[in-house]
Image (spheres, rainbow, N blue to C red):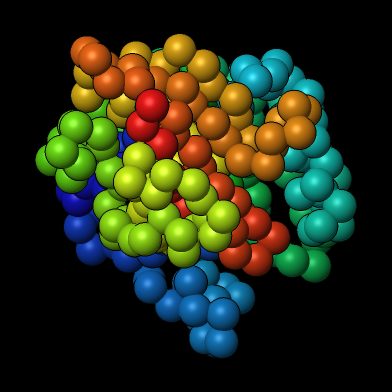
Amino acid sequence: MAIFQNPLWGFELTYPDSWAQVSNLGADGFAQNVEAFDPVSDVNEQAAYMLVRGEFNGKREAIAPLWSQHISKLSIMLGAKKLGASPFSMGGANGFEAEIQLPKKTNRRLWAGILARDTIILHFMVSHKKTERANFEPHATKIISSLRFLERIENLATNADNLPLPRNYALVDPVSLIPDVKNVERWQAYAGDSELAALQAFYYRELPQHGWEISEFIPFPNQEEIGFARLRIHKDDLTATLGILPTGEKKLLGQIVVMYD
């Protein structure tokens, strides 16, 4: 079995060695054939697959309304009839699951689940032809059953003050992210292409693991007229503000700035 680890959302799954794993557009996909994720492939329409998508629940909202919203959106988008939900627990997380009744002409089966643990919500979706249920469902079930939440990610890069850095984030001039920045010598900035929501989950989990205490956390979006996520942090004699700035299309991506007091 192969091991998949999402270093931002902080979860791990195992899946068959022969399967394909693709991460794109905020979702992690698993399938028996990599062409299942190719939008122009003839195989795509027929292929079976499983998707996992993370969501940051910084306000720790009740999961039941979130589940209703999720299922309603899926049902409208797919022209399906939703079925009653059942309680769903895995890996120390709790939530709901349901099999969604699709139009008969699709000849496909769709299962959806949602799990919540602390500030993390994971959305699961499994889709396959009805005739492939006996072949695909046991594998998908094993993958989901292998879910494990990680206390920390090993071997992360850090700056000189042991501030953890997400993978593929590079040091840049702070002025490139905040053009009107003052006292630039007090700032550090890092640019990359990860989801802003996932970066919030990353820092909420990893900062304490690296000796930093979070004294204030204002998640984004917020109702305090702050256009970014803000964490006030301190370690030993250091105090800093870490900001995660929304960028990119629909401002879904995040860039990192740190200002030391």
As rendered, which of 250 and 30 lies closer to the eye?
250
Task: Tell me what residue is drawn at x 24 percent, y 15 percent.
Answer: 237
Q: Is residue 138 in view?
A: no
Residue at image position (65%, 66%) is 249
Q: Residue at x 51, y 50 (%)?
A: 181
Which quadrant of the rendered structure holds the C terminus? top left
Query: How many numbered circles does the render carry?
Result: 0
Give the image location of residue 149, x and y in percent.
34, 27
Q: Is residue 83 left or right of residue 233?
A: right
| Horizontal side, residue 226 vs residue 76: left or right | left
Q: Give the residue displayed 83% in from the left and 41% down from the top.
A: 72
Q: Position of residue 132 (x, y in %)?
A: 50, 59
Position above or below: 111 against 200: below
48 relative position to 16: left or right: right
Q: Quadrant of residue 70?
A: top right
Residue, far front: 183
Give above or below for 103 relative to 59. below
Q: Measured along the vertical axis of the image, is residue 106 above or below residue 255? A: below
State the residue in front, 120 or 210.
Answer: 210
Residue 52 spot, x, y in % from top left: 49, 46
Q: Position of residue 18 (x, y in %)?
A: 23, 63
Q: Is residue 104 visible?
A: yes
Between 123 and 237, which is closer to the camera in this rendering? Answer: 237
